């Protein structure tokens, strides 16, 4: 046997080299290594977003908010409570393009302010710059600046609008202007893919971390670079701020407000409106917000009466140019609902806001318990809304006039003469209505909350605790043949309701002492 067989001595290798060689030589790892690397990177990003970035938002930004003093060019403008008298729909650029703006609100919540802190500035030629204005400085020099709040603007925009080309234009006493690319442009969920949608635009406000003051803008307008008539800001709306406690540090000072969808098609039910207001007053409501597009003179008289008493705020909702239910959801209702709860929360200072129509009454089942008392008893810090299942008092069921007082001038009160309803409540989110906690909600829908701050939830009110009593005229459906007798509202509020409605109608209509029912209050014929 030959001594030399051609074998080479094994060279010694370092352990790290051997480990790497083993990994590379493994076919499975070569095949799936890139995928594993991508997965690990994604998990790292999620960890950053969920833990590290949230830690930054909930520690750094609150510290900055507490340290900065928010000032106006003219503080006297926020001393008077906003009445909404100057709010109306304004065109953005060419009116034929159907872009419209209605109102704007300051929002200091971290879930909005900290969502995206990238800043972008675009100053057209000829615009005035002012080195003393911290708002303008923050956009010019993003390094060393932090957001302390945001402005939420309510508008009607095309569903497929180029969002990156929408800008917020800020103004303060006509002294300076700043144009800031919108941080967020979203359509309210219930748009049904129509051409135009109820929309909100959010722009952040930022200040220099080395300075103790940040100046707040008074007004804002929208501009849109893709349309020549919209490139310059024309229609400014005044920004609404909390009268006190601008950063939501303390608990709300007021309790319950009620939002009602837009009045339209010459709304004529004056008696129903009075009964609605008086019922919710008994339930603890302090303020009603009504969006008036079209109503009869009698209903207008009712609204003026309650507005003069400081109970109702009537908002001008006149706007035309859309084919409702083909171009835009009917009467711009989803702008109204969201605009309303921000108005109640920011400008009004209310903790709870009910989202209902004039034929819908929220009823707590507890013995002699008002709606406000029920909400306060069930409330928790992590609840964003209370959702009530609906039952229907249809107009095909025979009314019961046996309990009408002989002295009553207004004999058809829905809560007193209608006592037959559908037996089985609909499921939550199906024709339901709700009360929301404005500081915990980001976007409201017709029947439930769409977006809320993180780690909050909806409380589904069980039938044993409360129901939505829906007194519907002129429409039929939802298991109408399966009924039950329910006199609870009449038994609890009957004597008081007859008295207060009679008194108010006598004041509003002194000649007749009767509030008109409306010609079509009972238009559904019983099924044969």
Image (cartoon, rainbow, N blue to C red):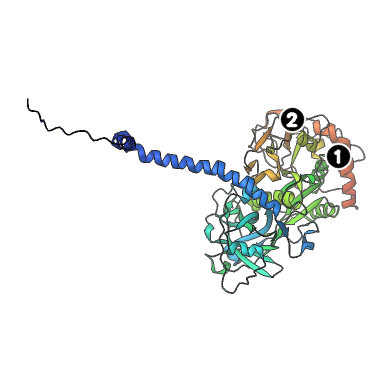
Q: Based on the displayed image, in which of its 4 quarters is residue 352 positioned?
A: top right
Q: Which mark is residue 497?
A: 1
Mark 1 closeness class: few <14, some 14–19, many ≥20 residues within 10 Å:
many
Q: Where is residue 389 drawn, in percent x and y?
A: 68, 34
Question: Marks 1/2: CA distance?
Answer: 22 Å
**Apparent side of residue 29 relative to residue 299 in the rendered image (left or right):** left
Q: Which residue is mark 2?
A: 465
Say if mark 1 contacts mark 2, CB within 8 Å. no
Residue 33 screen position, x and y as percent: 36, 38
Q: Quadrant of residue 413?
A: top right
Secondary structure state at the residue bearing disc 2? loop
* Residue name at image x 81 percent, y 59 percent: 80
The answer to whether 466 is drawn above or below residue 311 in the figure is above
Q: Quadrant of the C terminus?
A: top right
Please give the name of the residue rendered at 7% of the width and 28% of the height, measured from the top-left corner: 2
Regarding residue 193, the answer to whether it shows in the image is: yes
Q: Position of residue 419 (x, y in %)?
A: 78, 32
As rendered, which of 64 and 490 lies closer to the eye? 64
- 16 or 397, which lies in front? 16
Viewer can see residue 268? no
Closer to the camera in the image, 110 or 213: 213
Q: In the orientation shown, which residue stands out farthest toward the bottom?
A: 126
Residue 337 marker: none
Residue 47 screen position, x and y as percent: 52, 41
């Amino acid at each position: 046997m030959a001594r030399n067989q051609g074998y080479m001595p094994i060279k010694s290798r370092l352990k790290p080299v051997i480990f790497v060689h083993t990994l590379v030589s493994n076919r499975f790892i070569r095949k799936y290594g890139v995928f594993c690397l991508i997965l690990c990177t994604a998990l790292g990003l999620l960890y950053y977003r969920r833990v590290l970035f949230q830690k930054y938002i909930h520690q750094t930004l609150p510290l900055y908010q507490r340290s900065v003093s928010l000032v106006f060019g003219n503080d006297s403008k926020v001393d008077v409570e906003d009445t909404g008298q100057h709010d109306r729909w304004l065109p953005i650029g060419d009116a034929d393009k159907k872009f419209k703006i209605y109102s704007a609100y300051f929002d200091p919540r971290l879930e909005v302010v900290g969502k995206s802190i990238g800043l972008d500035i675009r100053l057209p030629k000829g615009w005035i710059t002012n080195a003393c204005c911290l708002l303008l400085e923050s956009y010019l020099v993003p390094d060393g600046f932090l957001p302390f709040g945001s402005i939420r603007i309510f508008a009607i925009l095309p569903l497929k609008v180029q969002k990156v080309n929408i800008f917020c234009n800020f103004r303060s006493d006509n002294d300076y202007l700043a144009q800031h690319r919108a941080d967020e442009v979203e359509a309210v969920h219930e748009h049904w893919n129509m051409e135009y949608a109820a929309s909100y635009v959010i722009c952040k406000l930022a200040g220099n971390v080395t300075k103790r003051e940040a100046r707040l803008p008074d007004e804002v307008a929208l501009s849109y670079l893709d349309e020549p008539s919209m490139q310059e800001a024309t229609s400014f709306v005044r920004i609404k701020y909390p009268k006190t406690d601008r950063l939501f540090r303390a608990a709300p000072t007021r309790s319950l407000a009620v939002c009602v969808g837009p009045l339209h098609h010459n709304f004529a039910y004056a008696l129903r409106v009075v009964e609605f207001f008086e019922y919710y007053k008994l339930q603890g409501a302090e303020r009603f917000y009504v969006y008036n597009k079209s109503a009869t003179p009698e209903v207008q008289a009712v609204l003026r009466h309650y507005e003069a008493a400081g109970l109702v705020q009537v908002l001008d909702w006149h706007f035309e140019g859309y084919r409702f239910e083909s171009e835009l959801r009917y009467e711009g209702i989803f702008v109204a609902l969201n605009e309303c709860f921000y108005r109640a929360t920011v400008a009004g200072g209310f903790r709870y806001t009910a989202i209902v129509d004039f034929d819908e009454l929220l009823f707590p089942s507890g013995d002699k318990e008002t709606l406000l008392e029920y909400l306060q008893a069930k409330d928790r810090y992590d609840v964003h809304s209370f959702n009530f299942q609906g039952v229907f008092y249809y107009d095909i069921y025979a009314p019961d006039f046996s309990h009408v007082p002989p002295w009553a001038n207004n004999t058809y009160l829905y809560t007193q003469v209608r006592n037959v309803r559908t037996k089985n409540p609909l499921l939550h989110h199906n024709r339901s209505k709700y009360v929301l906690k404005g500081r915990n909600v980001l976007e409201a829908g017709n029947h439930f909350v769409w977006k809320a701050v993180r780690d909050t939830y909806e409380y589904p009110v069980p039938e044993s605790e409360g129901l939505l009593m829906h007194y519907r005229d002129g429409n039929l459906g939802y298991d109408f043949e399966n009924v039950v007798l329910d006199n609870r509202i009449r038994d609890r509020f009957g004597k008081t309701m007859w008295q207060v409605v009679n008194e108010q109608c006598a004041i509003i209509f002194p000649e007749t002492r009767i509030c008109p029912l409306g010609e079509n209050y009972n238009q559904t014929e019983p099924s044969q």
